[in-house]
């Protein structure tokens, strides 16, 4: 009994005392540590080799990783909506069309491609991604 108490108290301190910058990744879900890592691992998981396949893979994983819902705000007074792609992927995972488009554009840019936000007459924000089509 005494040994169990000692191990219960000391083991966590011994095991985790020197661990820094710890990250867990696997081969079935993207690495969310940076936007670039997210996009590149999503492409790898989906077996994407062309730019078109990479764009579709990134879109599918952003879609699976977020939900449509109430826009998150930074303060309790709703003064500033969260529209930063890394926060939307790693913290909130919830937004409307603007956040979804912002995440797509952010990830695509970090992967080294050109992208922009567009606001058509429909009132919804959309992501406009650019790449060369390989024939």
Image (tube, rainbow, N blue to C red):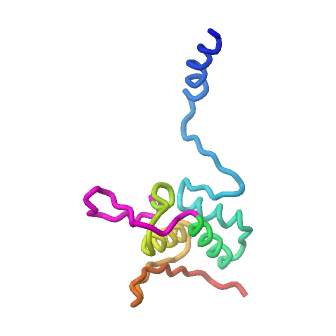
Asked if 36 appears above or below 15 in the picture, the reply is: below
Magenta: main secondary structure: loop
* Percent of width and height locating residue 120: 41, 88
Between 88 and 49, the one lying in front of the other is 88
> Residue 91 colored magenta?
no
Q: Quadrant of the N terminus?
A: top right
Residue furthest to the top in view is 2
> In the image, what residue occupies the spot 59% across and 59% down?
37
Asked if 88 appears above or below 55 in the picture, the reply is: above
* Percent of width and height locating residue 62: 56, 67
Q: Is residue 49 left or right of residue 91?
A: right
Q: Quadrant of the C terminus?
A: bottom right
Chain part drawn in magenta: 65-87
Asked if 59 appears above or below 41 in the picture, the reply is: below
* Percent of width and height locating residue 113: 55, 74
Among the 4 quarters of the image, the one containing residue 48 = bottom right
Number of labels in the image equals 0
Asked if 94 appears above or below 122 in the picture, the reply is: above
> Residue 75 colored magenta?
yes
> In the image, what residue occupies the spot 62% across and 75% down?
55
* Percent of width and height locating residue 47: 74, 68
Between 94 and 133, the one lying in front of the other is 94
> In the image, what residue occupies the spot 55% across and 27% down?
17
């Amino acid at each position: 009994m005494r040994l169990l108490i000692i191990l219960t108290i000391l083991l966590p301190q011994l095991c985790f005392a020197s661990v820094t910058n710890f990250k867990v990744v696997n081969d079935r879900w993207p690495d969310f540590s940076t936007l670039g890592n997210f996009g590149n691992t999503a492409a790898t998981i989906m077996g994407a080799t062309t730019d078109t396949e990479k764009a579709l893979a990134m879109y599918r994983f952003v879609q699976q990783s977020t939900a449509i819902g109430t826009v998150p705000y930074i303060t309790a007074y709703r003064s500033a909506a969260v529209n930063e792609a890394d926060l939307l992927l790693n913290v909130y995972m919830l937004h409307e069309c603007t956040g979804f488009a912002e995440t797509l554009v952010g990830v695509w840019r970090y992967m080294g491609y050109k992208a922009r936000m567009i606001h058509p007459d429909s009132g919804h924000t959309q992501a406009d991604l650019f790449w060369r089509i390989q024939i």
